[in-house]
Image (cartoon, rainbow, N blue to C red):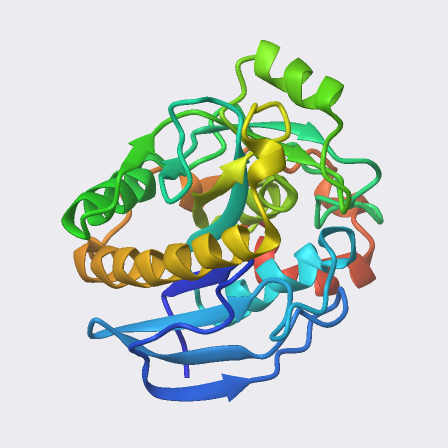
Amino acid sequence: MKASIGIIGGSGLYSMPGFEAAEEHLVGTPFGEPSDVYVVGKLAGKEVAFLARHGRGHRLSPSEINFRANIWGMKSLGVERILSLSAVGSLKEEHKPLDFVIPDQFVDRTRGRVSTFFGEGLVAHISFAHPICPQLAKVAHIAATEAGIHAKRGGTYLCMEGPAFSTVAESNLYRSWGMDVIGMTNLQEAKLAREAEICYVTIAMVTDYDCWHADHDAVTVKDILKVLTMNAENAAKLIAAAVWLMPASRDCKCGSALEHALITDRKAIPESTRKKLELLVAKYL
């Protein structure tokens, strides 16, 4: 079974309610194993693939996630659009727990993570000035409104390494930079989705204020788990609405992101690399 829409579930979201005729697919990739099986089925009348980013049971730390395999698997299933759900901390008073933010920018504070499919004799430099698909962000925001969720469109997601949370000094530094939310996963996904010519949007679900906030120490694990559960319920409503609202065709540039990105002389590309990356580059070679 193929799917045109992909959903990546973050902390607290390990399955997708409302799936019909769901089948599990174990997908192999040239980059190793994805986080879990892909659950492929129908949602709101459309073919959708769901993947739990951390694995069911939350087995994978952010630094352990095989982002390349996860995005490659989506591409191999025929996915053209990815709705990525991510639990985040708020860096601004205005973004309250249970609010959603649909950021349009990222700042990378990770260390040493692989965030490209390319190398091994084939060099590509994608445009990443605007890392989020505008068409998909619009759909997600409309869907949030229809689902009765308070969501802000726009803002910056700071992607940190983790798994430890920030120090107070770091949190205040990021606030001084004007960052909106902080998480540990979505930057790599966004880069790889762009290389795979897949439309991508982050739906950042605020669980709590980061440690800068005066009330931070009053928040308990029980409180956060309660918010995660409520966020997951809201996310399911948003996703169902977004899938229903999804336009039949893409009017963005995501589907041709590699058109002018491949730098290497075609004659110099090793045959093994051609074969390895055929899924991504065949139409340009």
Q: Quadrant of residue 37?
A: bottom right
Looking at the picture, does residue 34 appear above or below residue 144? below
Looking at the image, the residue that sits furthest to the front is 218
Q: Residue at x 54, y 84 (%)?
A: 25
- Spot the residue most to the top: 176
Using the image, determine if residue 266 lies above or below residue 212. Answer: below
Task: Look at the image and tell me whether residue 259 can be seen.
Answer: no
Nearer to us in this view, 232 or 22: 232
Relative to residue 51, is residue 153 drawn left or right? Answer: left
* Residue ID at (64%, 44%): 188
The image position of residue 22, as x and y in percent, is 39, 86
Lateral position of residue 166 relative to residue 126, left or right: right
Between residues 213 and 54, which one lies in front from this camera angle?
Answer: 213
Query: Number of callouts in the render?
Result: 0
Quarter of the figure with the N terminus: bottom left
**Residue positioned 48% across, 65% down in the render:** 13
Indicate whether 276 appears above or below 115.
below
Where residue 190 appears, x then y in whole percent? 55, 43
- Asked if residue 3 shows in the view, the reply is yes
Rendered location of residue 24, percent (x, y) = 51, 86
Q: In which quadrant of the rendered view does residue 137 lie?
A: top left
- Find residue 279 and report its horizontal and vertical position in percent: 59, 63
